């Protein structure tokens, strides 16, 4: 369902089937809709069998990196005698991304069930769900659902009467984008400043509280119950394109489309079909200019690059960008690309954790140069300077926030150079820039 | 079995290092300094400054040398064009918000930002037309000011307080380029070892109030020494300008004090600059003290010792060297001697994160040396003996008024001292000696580690090292005796050290096994 719009025939509702249905939020309502059958099933399975099923489904991480989920789970050590942890990354803060929000709001029990199954797969009994600080309504709903699940005996010391302990703890963030980075998220749960950690060690070796930890995105975990109930083969078959991109994907579309919302599509749906059919296309008299397909940190695609591009990991990569989180920002011909890129850079400058020099200083410097160009005060050498700064910010830091700031700058200048030149030459009047 | 090692090539030099050694340390073995800011060998590495990125063949990205273990067969490039460009980029980023107020900055001349920018930075900046980040100076603690505008956020100070002092009062506040080092508003930076953050700061962001605007780094002469503050024996540098001691700083010794010293030791240098020093030998004649040449003074000392029939009480000051105590004992050899050292007591202050490192209660750097050389009587016992003693020989001991009154009543007193003490009445002789800051010598710390110190400033007037005065008097006792002419010779002749020489001790010192019978 293209929530908040009615379901579109081009969608494939799996995770979004119950979006908009308040009864699905309740424990009883969820059970009535077939909920917690997958958990019951998983409780009868070995951890290896659960991991194998997820591996066979081809499920890949929906948070942005697209790492195969089953393989990630299989990295967890066996018989190491240490407590294992599951972290669920619900710190959905990437500009343009709001698909996890709908899962948290409408089907919190789907997430709880996915967390519980994943715990069984990685031999953990505790899951922390780290919810973005600004998501107050989703967090309230999730907390209510967790309380219900405990009251119903679905979670707790004797989960579903299995004699096994399963705990889910909701941890609210305080509003820092960087806490969506997996190791920063773990630091934040530990009560420390949310700074990304150096890897290695990777979380599967030393993660939360120094213990073996798996961290998965909300959408990834919410897909797991479906895979168990309906089978890996079914899930893997939900693909129109590459066998490496399976299942459905929630795409949150925002910007200049008639029906912005969260759409669930099978992997491989052509991007122009998504934009022009499902989302209703551009407003009257407007034409498509650019799309940022996977959250603000991926390269910008031009309208020409969007045409015929399959919406899956491989298709978007071939077009020169990334599926990322599935947060799609659509821009029509009224968009000032220089301004939009400045806004993105300003966001990253604001959110840089300040650890790495390149990111701390580079994001702020990049922003100032873009603001200068927008004020009509840029110089012709500014574009080369921006590209050189971007080069110094790419691949040089602990996490990829720095790279994420450089990416739209590089692709923006490469693909929309004329707009920059118009400001630099004075052909275009200075844009208003606050502050 | 030997620990496993790995062999790798760094900038063309092949080195073998223990497995687990980080590239930055392995590079040192190859004679290559990898420029760095956040890395410090006595702190955990956060790899945040990104200065130490190096190229490793076959790896897709440059890696931070401070947290990347050396691997067998690796080929590492520190000075390749790509690595150099990366550092150039970091330096340019660091200078965006760094004020370039070097002409008024205490760190100038010993600033790692200056050094590396000079070495491989760019002459100009492309960050034109913008104001730099501004935050006001903050008073962090009794001797520490924070000048946030100069801060490069390396977090060494934060990590020192977190992991070494284990008193986490500092943190990084704010984010992005607005970040600065914040202090817990309920606390001050007053931990007894907090002064180390000033040394750790690679730029002039954390500065010592005591040293503020006192001297330019390039005007300082630096002398390896041992902290005279307590029995710990921290290795230090005495920094002087024009013969005036302006600060003490820790000198790395991984076995004693790593890279640190306490604030008590750090502040304990003003006495080195005292102006009211005894500069001339004085000998009592016809009821008054008269200035004499050293030959006459030494002859008096030798004669008076020779004339001593009864007990001699030897009172040794807390900063007396092994050479001084040893030669005093030799001068008095064969006589009835009761020798003791004055040991003031104070509070202890451990540095939690480093085992066996603390400001010790016994504020005497050579207490263990004194014991090994036979000056092991209790001070109060020795003072009780003073009224019956035939001779009281004093080696720059600090006295309470009561002790001074007791000694003033003694029959015969010879005072080897740095400062005249009018409370002592009229000694037989007052002989000017050097302080530990003006002489070469050895202290033995509480763990039996003998460590050398070197002269940092010129002795005033005619002052001589105590050992040379005492040895010269000893040589007068028999024609075949030849006094040592250097402190090194003087030390080598001391029996409790079994023939160890200054050269053997080097600059790191050496543990001397305790002889049987010495606890």
Image (tube, coloured by chain):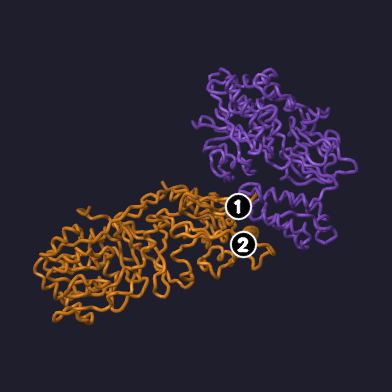
Identify the element where label 1 is drawn.
loop
Quadrant of res A423: bottom right
Q: Residues within 10 Å of mark 2 (few under 14, many from 20)?
A: many
Q: Point out residue B26 in the picture as x, y percentages from the top left corner.
A: 51, 55
Q: Residues within 10 Å of mark 1 (few under 14, many from 20)?
A: many
Identify the element where label 2 is drawn.
helix
**Which label number is shown at residue B413?**
none
Residue drawn where x is 30% and y is 79% of the image: B461
Would you place residue B300 above or below residue A109 in this image? below
Q: Give the chain letter for purple.
A: A
The residue under label 2 is B95
Residue drawn where x is 52% and y is 37% of the image: A209
Q: Is residue B362 left or right of residue A110?
A: left
Would you place residue B404 above or below residue A6 in this image? below
The residue nearer to you, when weighing B75 against B492, is B492
The residue under label 1 is A356
Residue drawn where x is 69% and y is 30% of the image: A105
Q: Point out residue B245 in the picture as x, y percentages from the top left corner.
A: 39, 70
Q: Give the chain letter for orange.
A: B
- Which chain hosts label 1? A
């Amino acid at each position: 369902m293209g929530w908040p719009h009615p379901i579109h025939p081009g969608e494939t509702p799996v995770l979004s089937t119950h979006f908009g249905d308040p009864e699905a939020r309740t424990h009883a309502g969820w059970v009535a809709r077939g909920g917690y059958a997958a958990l019951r099933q998983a409780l009868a399975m070995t951890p290896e069998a659960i991991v194998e099923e997820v591996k066979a489904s081809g499920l890949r991480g929906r948070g942005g990196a697209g790492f195969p989920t089953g393989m990630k789970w299989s990295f967890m050590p066996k018989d190491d005698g240490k407590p294992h942890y599951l972290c669920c990354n619900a710190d959905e803060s990437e500009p343009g991304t709001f698909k996890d929000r709908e899962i948290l709001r409408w089907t919190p029990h789907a997430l709880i069930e996915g967390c519980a199954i994943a715990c069984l797969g990685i031999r953990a009994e505790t899951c922390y769900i780290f919810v973005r600080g600004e998501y107050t309504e989703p967090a309230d709903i999730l907390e209510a659902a967790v309380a219900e699940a405990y009251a119903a005996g679905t979670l707790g010391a004797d989960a579903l009467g299995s004699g096994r302990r399963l705990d889910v703890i909701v941890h609210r963030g305080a509003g820092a984008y960087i806490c969506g980075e997996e190791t920063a998220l773990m630091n934040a749960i530990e009560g420390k400043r949310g700074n990304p950690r150096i890897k290695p060690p990777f979380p599967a070796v030393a993660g939360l509280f120094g213990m073996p930890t798996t961290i998965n995105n909300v959408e990834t975990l919410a897909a797991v119950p479906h895979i168990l109930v309906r089978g890996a083969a079914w899930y893997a078959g939900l693909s129109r394109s590459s066998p490496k991109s399976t299942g459905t994907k929630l795409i949150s579309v925002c910007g200049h489309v008639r029906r912005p919302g969260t759409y669930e599509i099978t992997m491989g749906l052509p991007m122009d079909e998504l934009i022009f059919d499902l989302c209703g296309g551009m407003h009257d008299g407007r034409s498509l200019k650019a799309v940022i397909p996977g959250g603000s940190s991926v390269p910008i695609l031009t309208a020409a690059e969007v045409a015929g591009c399959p919406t899956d990991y491989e298709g978007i990569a071939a077009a020169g960008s990334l599926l990322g989180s599935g947060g799609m920002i659509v821009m029509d011909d009224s968009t000032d690309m220089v301004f939009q890129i400045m806004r993105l850079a300003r966001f990253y400058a604001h959110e840089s954790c300040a650890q790495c020099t390149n990111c701390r200083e580079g994001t702020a410097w990049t922003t100032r140069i873009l603001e200068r160009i927008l004020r009509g005060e840029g110089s012709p050498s500014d574009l080369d300077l921006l590209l050189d700064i971007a080069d110094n910010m790419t691949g040089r830091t602990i996490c990829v926030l720095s790279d994420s700031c450089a990416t739209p700058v590089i692709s923006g200048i490469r693909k929309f150079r004329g707009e920059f030149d118009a400001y630099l030459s004075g052909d275009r009047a200075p844009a208003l820039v606050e502050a | 079995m030997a620990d496993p090692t790995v062999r790798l090539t760094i900038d063309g030099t092949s080195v073998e290092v223990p497995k687990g050694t980080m590239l930055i340390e392995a590079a040192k073995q190859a004679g290559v300094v990898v420029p760095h800011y956040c890395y410090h060998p006595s702190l955990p590495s956060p790899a945040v400054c990104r200065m130490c990125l190096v190229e490793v063949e076959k790896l897709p990205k440059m890696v931070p040398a401070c947290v990347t273990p050396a691997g067998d067969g690796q080929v590492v490039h520190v000075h390749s064009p790509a690595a150099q460009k990366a550092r150039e980029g970091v330096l340019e980023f660091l200078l965006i918000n760094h004020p370039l107020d070097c002409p008024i900055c205490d760190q100038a001349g010993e600033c790692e930002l200056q050094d590396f920018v000079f070495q491989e930075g760019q002459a100009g900046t492309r960050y034109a037309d913008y104001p730099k980040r501004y935050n006001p100076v903050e008073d962090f603690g009794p001797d520490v000011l924070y000048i946030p505008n100069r801060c490069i956020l390396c977090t060494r100070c934060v990590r020192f307080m977190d992991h070494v002092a284990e008193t986490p009062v500092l943190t990084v506040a704010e984010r992005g380029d607005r970040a600065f080092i914040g202090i817990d508003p309920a606390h001050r930076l007053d931990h007894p070892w907090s002064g180390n953050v000033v040394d750790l700061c690679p730029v002039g962001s954390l500065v010592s109030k005591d040293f503020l605007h006192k001297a330019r780094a390039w005007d300082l002469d630096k002398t390896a020494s041992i902290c005279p503050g307590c029995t710990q024996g921290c290795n230090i540098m005495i920094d002087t300008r024009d013969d005036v001691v302006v600060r003490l700083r820790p000198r790395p010794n991984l076995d004693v004090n790593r890279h640190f010293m306490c604030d008590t030791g750090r502040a304990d240098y003003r006495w080195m600059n005292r102006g009211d020093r005894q500069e001339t030998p004085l000998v009592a004649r016809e009821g008054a003290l008269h200035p004499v040449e050293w030959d006459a003074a030494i002859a008096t000392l030798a004669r008076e010792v020779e004339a001593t029939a009864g007990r001699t009480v030897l009172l040794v000051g807390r900063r007396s060297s092994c050479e001084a105590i040893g030669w005093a004992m030799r001068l008095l050899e064969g006589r009835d001697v009761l020798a003791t050292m004055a040991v003031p007591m104070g509070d202890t202050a451990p540095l939690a994160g480093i085992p066996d490192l603390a400001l010790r209660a016994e504020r005497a750097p050579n207490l263990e040396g004194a014991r090994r050389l036979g000056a092991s009587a209790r001070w109060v016992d020795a003072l009780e003996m003073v009224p019956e003693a035939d001779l009281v020989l004093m080696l720059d001991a600090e006295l309470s008024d009561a002790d001074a009154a007791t000694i003033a009543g003694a029959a015969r007193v010879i005072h080897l001292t740095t400062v005249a003490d009018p409370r002592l009445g009229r000694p037989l002789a007052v002989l000017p000696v050097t302080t530990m800051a003006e002489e070469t010598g050895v202290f033995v710390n509480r763990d039996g580690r003998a460590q050398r110190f070197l002269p940092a400033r010129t002795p005033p007037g005619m002052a001589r090292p105590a050992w040379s005065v005492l040895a010269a008097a000893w040589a007068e006792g028999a024609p075949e005796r030849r006094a040592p002419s250097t402190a090194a010779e003087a030390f080598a002749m001391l029996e409790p050290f079994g023939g160890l020489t200054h050269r053997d001790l080097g600059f790191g010192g050496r543990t001397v096994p305790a002889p049987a019978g010495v606890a």
